[in-house]
Amino acid sequence: MMIITTILCILIVFANARWTENDCGKRPIEPFLANNNTVVGGIQAMRGDWPWSCSMRYNGRHICGGSLINTNWIISAAHCVTSTLPTAYIWYCGGHELQVNETYTQVVHTKRVIPHSAYDSQLIRNDIALFELISPIVLTDYVLPVCYPSINDAYEHEISMATGWGTPIVGGNLSNVHMEVEMPILTDTACKDKYRQFGNMLDITTQICAGRKEEGKDTCQGDSGGPLIVRHTDNDWYLIGLTSWGLGCGEGGVYTRTSAYRDWVLSYTGSLPNSSV
């Protein structure tokens, strides 16, 4: 037993020492599980598939998602902030199942909550918030930061992925396991046309649309604040959006355009991994 424990400790230390913040957007577990299609349609993510995706717990219950952007900061949606008291929010990173205490999960408390000062809860504008962690998170194969896009990055027509533990239908129960959905990024014109009925509620300079009604793919309640990501030509994944709002579920949605807030994020975090300042 002593020998086994020692070996496990050595393996964990080795895994932790392997990664730095510059290794953003990488999926170390993906090559080992890529052919293990356990669910038809690929709606259930594989354990460790999206290492930056974290669960926000409020009063012990999952309420929103978030993304690790460096060892000290998680980014999410401002509408997830129901209290500015940091101790109200606990983050679970590296996990797959909500109701299981998993070996690879890191539980981290919040030091500071920073919703955007211009957040408008009526128009759902500037729906972005930063959470400073009380202690640095340890980078492992199961917990790594996502890359942050540059201000001028464009994603029209690209295929994106959204992940989270949200409900599959409006008013339904949360998913116990981490889920993923693939959706196309709409053009700015298509996005404005889709939500024209809402007048000035949509701001295409700070928001991005993904998913189409006819495809029936979308994020839903409980996915708020979670990542909308695309794979760049460098094979790393970049956080292009935060789940914000939509017309019910299954009709596509509106996401906070993270590239528009790059300078705001940097003003607090000081740095972003693998991206030019």
Image (tube, helix red, strand yellow):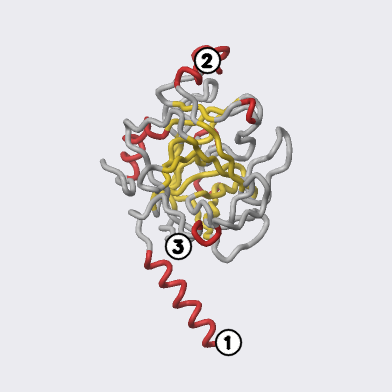
Residue 138 at x, y percent in the picture? 43, 61
Residue in the foreground of this view, choosing between 179 and 89: 179
User: Which circle marks residue 1 in the picture?
Assistant: 1
Q: In this rendering, is residue 203 above or below 73? A: above
Q: Earlier in the sequence, mark 3 or mark 1?
A: 1
> On the picture, is 100 further left or further right than 153?
right
Label 2 sits on a secondary structure element that is helix
Observer-side mark, 2 or 3, equals: 2
Distance from disc 2 to disc 3, alpha carbons, whole Å, reads: 43 Å
Residue at x-position 45% and y-position 40%: 230
Distance from disc 3 to disc 1, alpha carbons, whole Å, reads: 24 Å
Q: Residues within 10 Å of mark 2 (few under 14, many from 20)?
A: few
> On the picture, is 216 further left or further right than 245?
right
The residue type indicated by label 3 comes to Thr
User: Which circle marks residue 165 in the picture?
Assistant: none
Q: Earlier in the sequence, mark 2 or mark 3?
A: 3
- Residue indicated by mark 3: 140
Residue in the foreground of this view, choosing between 9 and 35: 35
